[in-house]
Image (spheres, coloured by chain):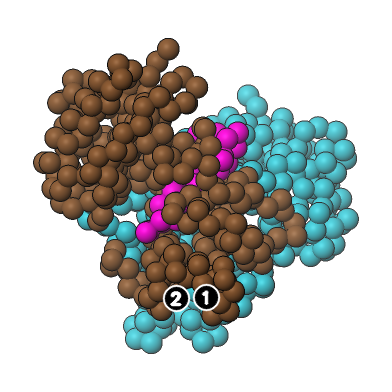
Chain colours: A cyan, B brown
Amino acid sequence: MTRAAGIDVGGTKFLGVVLDDQGNVLVELRRPTPKGSEALISGLVDFARELAAHDSVGYDTLGVGVPGLVTSEGVIRASPNLVGAFDLLVGPLLIEALGHPVSVDNDATCAALAEWQLGAGRGFADLIVVTLGTGIGGGLILGGRLQRGTNGFAGEFGHMVVQPDGPLCPCGRRGCWERFASGRGLQMLAGGRRGEDVVAAARSGDREMLAVIDEFARWVALGLVNLTNIVDPACIVLGGGLSADHDLFLPLIGREFASLLYSPEHRRHPELRFAALGERAGAVGAALLPTTHH
Amino acid sequence: MTRAAGIDVGGTKFLGVVLDDQGNVLVELRRPTPKGSEALISGLVDFARELAAHDSVGYDTLGVGVPGLVTSEGVIRASPNLVGAFDLLVGPLLIEALGHPVSVDNDATCAALAEWQLGAGRGFADLIVVTLGTGIGGGLILGGRLQRGTNGFAGEFGHMVVQPDGPLCPCGRRGCWERFASGRGLQMLAGGRRGEDVVAAARSGDREMLAVIDEFARWVALGLVNLTNIVDPACIVLGGGLSADHDLFLPLIGREFASLLYSPEHRRHPELRFAALGERAGAVGAALLPTTHH
């Protein structure tokens, strides 16, 4: 029986799990994310040792998911949400400190892997997983394999430009999809009201906020349609913070999707589903990294 | 020595080739495309027999590339540029009439396969081929395999929406990429002047038409950047009618691409190349279909 450990490095916290062979979570731990890149690495080393020691479970393999552009050698090239993380050798430094192999990949790629292997996308050979959080990340499974692209940067769906004269994105371009279809996008469309308040108001019948939710759903659908035209998936899994309100969002996104899809009457539409693994997806996927073909 | 025949079904003509084992073109034939779906099928049957009989070369396998949405069973679901072609059983009907297997796929997918195996994209495991013609088509190679998607519809890049309030597309939506970045797009940006005239004027230093070419290059680059954010290719091959003026277009597209790419300073950029196989690409790729893993 092998034990697979995974750590999801978030902007505010580490989430670590240890899985058994069947993907059951045996251990789950959380710690605040330290500030600065040196503290980040030493904090990760300590956290990995804590996971190894916890309840005498131990682990045989370790994977780590981090936000940003991550190379196949486990180097963070750029991570706007992780302070100081440019050209940070996460993989090599962890391997040196821990003395065993460590797989490192993008956090949304990890979440996609988890949803594909153990979650809402199980069994699909052609699958897109889109994480609608503060921004938008994601991962691609095509031809029955996780596709990372040549640098390991595939799945940066959030920076697909859908409105070239749209609002400025922190990435320096205008009208990126995540300006509209993320948690921040919902807030912008609602004139600055917090997403939770928009949802609550919409649920209580506020017509103005219902219209905002409609507009938001249309932006989400537009990006999903673009992805469908490009890779033709059998299923699209939507994860991230918005999953909590899937009963509100899914029917609206589905309706807009059908109205925007190219040649909708001549094709089988991809199934739209919300993610099954919740906030654990990144850590679970990180744990699956070492045994994933790439 | 096996002989591989391929037929590219264009809106105006059939182009047929027979290749030897090394991909050399032994036979090349052209015939006008007949009007109507029955005439199309019987014309294809006659053309295949003509290819088989030509110069006593013969063929062992046959592939056919057709425009539009083509299922993995060789059924055209919808083909706006091929009159009457909705739910047309091209594959099954050809197999019945000819008495041997026939592989059928989308024409741009065929061109992508050809450029990957024998053209400008040779040797790349992660490759996008974009055909900039009257509209925009394309194909995806990821993880060293041609990716068709679940229905066989992957690569419909032209209908990626890049300007939701943009000009109406015949597909029924607004602001599809091919409204801007195709031959028709160039004409629209030039206020109705023909593409050839725009290019000629730009080459002779016409500042207004140079500005149009700049704007066109920016639209092309914007779509290529979106594709790069999504699949992270090592190389992008540009084919189609605009290839003839690659010396004019490529530097401009390259410059705009670098300025639009997400986090350009932290990644290896994909190589931008123009296609090598010219108008034969579709037929050559069709010939490669029967021996391509899918």
- Residue range of the region highlighted in magenta in the rendering: B120-146
Nearer the observer, A203 or B15: B15
Chain letter of disc 1 in the image: B
B272 lies above or below B56 = below
Residue type, mark 1 in image: Met
Q: Quadrant of the N terminus of chain B?
A: top left
In the rendered image, residue B17 lying in the magenta stretch gets the answer: no
Residue under the image location 23 percent in, 26 percent down? B50
Residue reaching furthest to the left: B38
Residue type, mark 2 in image: Ala
Report which residue position mark 2 lands on.
Answer: B190
Residue under the image location 35 percent in, 71 percent down? B174
Residue under the image location 13 percent in, 48 percent down? B36
Q: Name the image quarter holding residue A224.
A: bottom left
Badge 1 element? helix
Gap in angstroms between the C-alphas marked 2 and 1: 7 Å
B48 lies above or below B77 = above
Report which residue position mark 1 lands on.
Answer: B209
Please say if the residues under marks 2 and 1 sit with CB atoms less than 8 Å apart.
yes
How many neighbours does mark 2 have within 10 angstroms: few (below 14), some (14-19), or many (20 or more)? many
